[in-house]
Each structure stands twice: as structure tokens, then as C-alpha cells.
Image (tube, coloured by chain):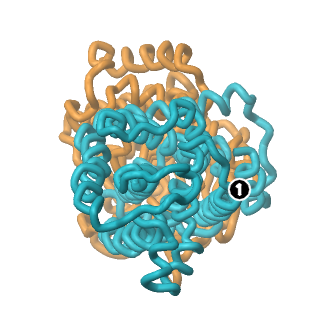
């Protein structure tokens, strides 16, 4: 891993909803051209962190910077470098794939001719070129996700953040999407923050950040976390770190 | 519009605005948002039809029934005796815009719950600008509805002077902005979709009935001076009067001032409420993943 300007630097971030503390002194960094997995159960604070990174909420305490652009002081510069895939589906179901993509491009100040050229390229990569004119409503869940990832890449961000992108997808679609994003890291040098509660989505060489009840309990290459905790697998390491059986499936 | 933008900038001024965008990019963004809202509106055929049927029901049925009950005297801007159906047309136009404003507000709450709103809010352009674009887009959609209504009304022998159709345009833009901004302000305060029905009852009905939309205020005063007083203070009355005067090629300065002032106030409030640092946005970040 090269030591350069981190794609994403999170430094001492805390966030509360009234009395409930969702994040408590969270710090970590994601390097360019690396795949970082933010691992945590539902309710660990992953989505809150995403909302702070994408400036849906104001940062209460701490600092978040995207390639050294502070999201509070230079939100425009920070946001134009981020591509986001939210957990909830955020495509317009009644518009076509192309219309969804050009709308997003317009929000980034990209004109429609340029947007269509870029969109066609991206759609080719996710094998949906021939469906550009189809309404999003007619796509499968996995296809929608792929379109959302394509959309997040339209403005050529250098950091891609994805919040539980594989939730609700079948095994094949999950593998597809994971593979697609890993290729982006390898081929385009995009920094990726991939939030999930599915432990098997992390590879041994990935940076893994374990988030539990709003705190970072572990941060490092997956293999190192496993070795440091004396566990045999990442799942075990996760259980040891969070101090209990990984009882996934609780809706937040 | 400039005045809205200028005053609206203040609440978010604490962030050092990056100068990273060209005017062309701002224009592309505006065009994209207006285009998307229009497209969505045209796709929702039921919404288009109900937006048109609602005022027509009032015009065809209510006005016809009330024609004999309510006598009209000659009041400005009219220079002759008019039929009741002609009197309520400006009120119905404003009603179209009121419903449209609330509808886009409703869709903002819906978008926020479903996550679509995030697409808009993660745009790198300044948030006040995005909200202004959204407001302009909603207003553009309301103009479309109003002109279709006016065409149908023309066949019903509601025939304002031809120049009125043009003169009313700036008035419609302004009243559309005011009612849209009000909707946006309300949407920022409504936490969940379920609460919206109540808001509709508490906003739409009082605003519409306690105004000069259905009856001239002098008639109201005969029945209840207090209610007439409320009507005079109701911004919706001024939207109606602005439209009424403009439709007959006249200016109503008081209404113009009230509508412009309210637009700025509502919009500033909405921008303040949608400022991330205020945290008025839906609180449960994790609530989006019901899938």
C-alpha cells in the first residue's frame, strides 16, 4: 500500500442522534487504488458514517476529508470526487436507464452529449448497452445495482463508497458486483469503501475496518486482523473483536 | 429570482463556497432537474389528469351551482358585471399551483424516505442552488397545468383579454415559486410520509377557503369581519389577486410585494432547514434499507 494522500480520511468522528451515540471517535483512512471493507452488523453505524461522508448530515465532531478536501469546508470539491451507491435503491423507476444516468450527470454539470457518451461506455462494461432505453422498473435487482454503480462512476470519481451494495441480491449477482468493483480498483485506481455485514465479501488482502456499536475495533489487512486476534478465520476474528457471536440479521 | 438566491445564500454562508463550477455547469444542472421533473410529471398520467380535473370540477359544477347564490358587483380588476364562474378562475389557477406545490413537497418527503432525495443532495453543486432548481422545476410543471386549464376554461366561455394570457405568466411564475417554496419548507419539517395527510388538511384547506379564491373579501366581511381580516393576511389571497389582476392586464402592487416577500421568506426557511448542519433531514440513516 502506497503512502500518499488518502482517498478518504476520517479523523475522530462522533455523531449522536439526541442521546443515542451512533459513532464514537471513528478514525481510519482509505488509500487510492485500494479496496477497504467496512465490516459491521446492522446498526453498527455504517449508514450514519456514509451520510456524514456524503454530507447528508453535518459533521458534529471530527473531520472527514476526501483527497484532503474537507467535506464541511469544501463540500463541492469533496463531493465531485466521490461516487456513491446507497443502500436504498435510488434510481427513478419510471425513467429509462439512460435518462437516470443523464440526470445524474446533469447534477454534476455534465452536458447531455458528453453524458450519453460516458453512459454508453459504462453500460457496455456492465453488459446493459442494449437496454439503455428500458425503464428501470423492468430491471432485476442485480441489474439495478449495476446501473447504480455505473451512475456513481459517471462523473469519474476517485473514491467510490458503497453502502451494503449486495443486500437482497442472489449469489451470482453478488459475485458479479463484487468482481466489477474489484476490477475498478485494479484497473482504474479507484479507492473503494465497501460497507457490509457479510464477512465473506472481504478478501485476505483487503483492508478491513471493524465497526461495532459506533466504534472502530479493528483496522488493517484482513490477514493481519486474523493473525492478531489469534483466530483461524476473519469470521472468528470478528467475533473475538466484537466480543460475541455475530448475530446478523437484526434490522436497525 | 435573483433576490431569492441572494437572500437564500446567507444561511449556508459558513461554508467557504468552492469556486469550482462554471456558469455553464450551473445551467446544465438546472436544465437537468427541470427536465427530470417534467418527465416524471408526464409519466404520472393520473397526476396530470387529477391536477386538471380538480379545478374543472370546481368550475363546471361548483361555479354553476353557486352562480345564482352569489351576486357579484363590479370590483377591480373587472370593469363590468361578471359571472361567478369567471370570478373563481384565478382562484382555481392558484389552487392548481397550491396543489402542485404540496405535491412536489409530498414527493420530496417520499423521495427522502425512499432515498431518491440523496441523488440530488450528493450533487457537488451548492445545496441552496439545488433546492432553487427543484423549486423552479416544480413551478414549470405548474405552469403547464395552468395553461392547459386555461385552454379548457376558454371553451367554457371564460375568455380573459388575449393579452392577459401573456401578462399572467410572470404572475404565475411568482405565485408558483411562493407556493412551491411553502411546500418545500413544509417538507423539511415533516418527518414521515404518514404525517402528510394532516399537513394537507391544515395547510391546503384553510389557505384555500380563507382567501379571496371563492368569494370576494367584501362579501366575507359582511358575514364575519374576523374572517375577512384573516383572508387579507393570507398569502394565498395575494397569489390569487396577483393572478386575477394580471389576467386582466393590471398590476396589484400590494399582492406583488406580499407574494415576493413570502417567496423569499419560505425559500430561506427551506434552505436553512435543508442545511446539513441543521440536521432537519430524516434522522434514521439506517431506515432506508427496508428491502
- Residue at image coords 71%, 56%: B253
Quarter of the image with the N terminus of chain B is top right
Query: Mark 1 packing: few (<14 Cα in 10 Å), some, or many (20+)?
Result: few
In the image shown, does B133 or A100 lie closer to the viewer? B133
The colour of chain A is orange
Whole-percent x and y of residue A226?
A: 42, 56
In the image shown, does A24 or A235 lie closer to the viewer? A24
Quick one: SS at disc 1? helix
In the image shown, does A7 or B192 lie closer to the viewer? B192
- Residue at image coords 53%, 14%: A113
Q: Chain of mark 1?
A: B
Q: Which residue is mark 1?
A: B253
In the image shown, does A74 or B116 lie closer to the viewer? B116
- Residue at image coords 61%, 41%: B249
Total residue callouts: 1
Whole-percent x and y of residue B33?
A: 51, 36
Is B233 placed left or right of B290 in the picture?
A: right
Quarter of the image with the C terminus of chain B is bottom left
Whole-percent x and y of residue A119?
A: 45, 19
Judge whether residue A190 can be spotted in this image: no
Q: Eyeballing the image, is B268 above or below A80? A: below
Is B238 placed left or right of A165 in the picture?
A: right
Q: Eyeballing the image, is A97 above or below A75? A: above
Q: Eyeballing the image, is B254 above or below B189? A: above
The chain drawn in cyan is B
The image quadrant of residue A138 is top left
The image quadrant of residue B91 is bottom left
Whole-percent x and y of residue B124?
A: 63, 41
- Residue at image coords 49%, 13%: A117
Judge whether residue B126 can be spotted in this image: yes
Amino acid at each position: 500500500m502506497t503512502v500518499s494522500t488518502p482517498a478518504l480520511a476520517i479523523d475522530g468522528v462522533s455523531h449522536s442522534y439526541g442521546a443515542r451515540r451512533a459513532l464514537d471517535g471513528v478514525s481510519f483512512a482509505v488509500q487510492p487504488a485500494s479496496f477497504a471493507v467496512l465490516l459491521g452488523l446492522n446498526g453498527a453505524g455504517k449508514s450514519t458514517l456514509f451520510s456524514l461522508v456524503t454530507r447528508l448530515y453535518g459533521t458534529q465532531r471530527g473531520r472527514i476529508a476526501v483527497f484532503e478536501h474537507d467535506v464541511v469546508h469544501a463540500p463541492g470539491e469533496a463531493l465531485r470526487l466521490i461516487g456513491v451507491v446507497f443502500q436504498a435503491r435510488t434510481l427513478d423507476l419510471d425513467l429509462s436507464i439512460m435518462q437516470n444516468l443523464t440526470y445524474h450527470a446533469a447534477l454534476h454539470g455534465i452536458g447531455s452529449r458528453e453524458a450519453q457518451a460516458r453512459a454508453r461506455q459504462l453500460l457496455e462494461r456492465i453488459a446493459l448497452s442494449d437496454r439503455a432505453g428500458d425503464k428501470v422498473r423492468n430491471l432485476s435487482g442485480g441489474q439495478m445495482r449495476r446501473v447504480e454503480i455505473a451512475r456513481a462512476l459517471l462523473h469519474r470519481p476517485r473514491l467510490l463508497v458503497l453502502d451494503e451494495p449486495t443486500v437482497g441480491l442472489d449469489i451470482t449477482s453478488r459475485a458479479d458486483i463484487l468482481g466489477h468493483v474489484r476490477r475498478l480498483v485494479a484497473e482504474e485506481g479507484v479507492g473503494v469503501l465497501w460497507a457490509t455485514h457479510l464477512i465473506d465479501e472481504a478478501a485476505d488482502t483487503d483492508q478491513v475496518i471493524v465497526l461495532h456499536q459506533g466504534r472502530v475495533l479493528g483496522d488493517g489487512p484482513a490477514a493481519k486482523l486474523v493473525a492478531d486476534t489469534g483466530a483461524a478465520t476473519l469470521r472468528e476474528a470478528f467475533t473475538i473483536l466484537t466480543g460475541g457471536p455475530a448475530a446478523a440479521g437484526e434490522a436497525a | 429570482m435573483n433576490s431569492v438566491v441572494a437572500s437564500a445564500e446567507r444561511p449556508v454562508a459558513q461554508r467557504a463556497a468552492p469556486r469550482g463550477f462554471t456558469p455553464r455547469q450551473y445551467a446544465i444542472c438546472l436544465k437537468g432537474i427541470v427536465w427530470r421533473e417534467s418527465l416524471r410529471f408526464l409519466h404520472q398520467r393520473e397526476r396530470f389528469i387529477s391536477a386538471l380535473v380538480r379545478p374543472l370540477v370546481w368550475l363546471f359544477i361548483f361555479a354553476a351551482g353557486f352562480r345564482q347564490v352569489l351576486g357579484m358587483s363590479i370590483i377591480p380588476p373587472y370593469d363590468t358585471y361578471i359571472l361567478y364562474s369567471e370570478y373563481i378562475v384565478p382562484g382555481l389557477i392558484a389552487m392548481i399551483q397550491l396543489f402542485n406545490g404540496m405535491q412536489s413537497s409530498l414527493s420530496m418527503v417520499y423521495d427522502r424516505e425512499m432515498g431518491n432525495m440523496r441523488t440530488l443532495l450528493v450533487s457537488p453543486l451548492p445545496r441552496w442552488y439545488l433546492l432553487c432548481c427543484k423549486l423552479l422545476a416544480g413551478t414549470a410543471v405548474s405552469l403547464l397545468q395552468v395553461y392547459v386549464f386555461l385552454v379548457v376554461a376558454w371553451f367554457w366561455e371564460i375568455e380573459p383579454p388575449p393579452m392577459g394570457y401573456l401578462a399572467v405568466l410572470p404572475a404565475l411564475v411568482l405565485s408558483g415559486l411562493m407556493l412551491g417554496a411553502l411546500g418545500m419548507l413544509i417538507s423539511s419539517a415533516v418527518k414521515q410520509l404518514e404525517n402528510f395527510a394532516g399537513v394537507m388538511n391544515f395547510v391546503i384547506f384553510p389557505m384555500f377557503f380563507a382567501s379571496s379564491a371563492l368569494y370576494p373579501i367584501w362579501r366575507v366581511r359582511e358575514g364575519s369581519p374576523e374572517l375577512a381580516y384573516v383572508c387579507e393576511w393570507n398569502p394565498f389571497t395575494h397569489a390569487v389577486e396577483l393572478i386575477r389582476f394580471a389576467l386582466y392586464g393590471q398590476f396589484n402592487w400590494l399582492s406583488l410585494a406580499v407574494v415576493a416577500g413570502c417567496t423569499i421568506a419560505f425559500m430561506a426557511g427551506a434552505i436553512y432547514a435543508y442545511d446539513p448542519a441543521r440536521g432537519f433531514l430524516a434522522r434514521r440513516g439506517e431506515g432506508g434499507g427496508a428491502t
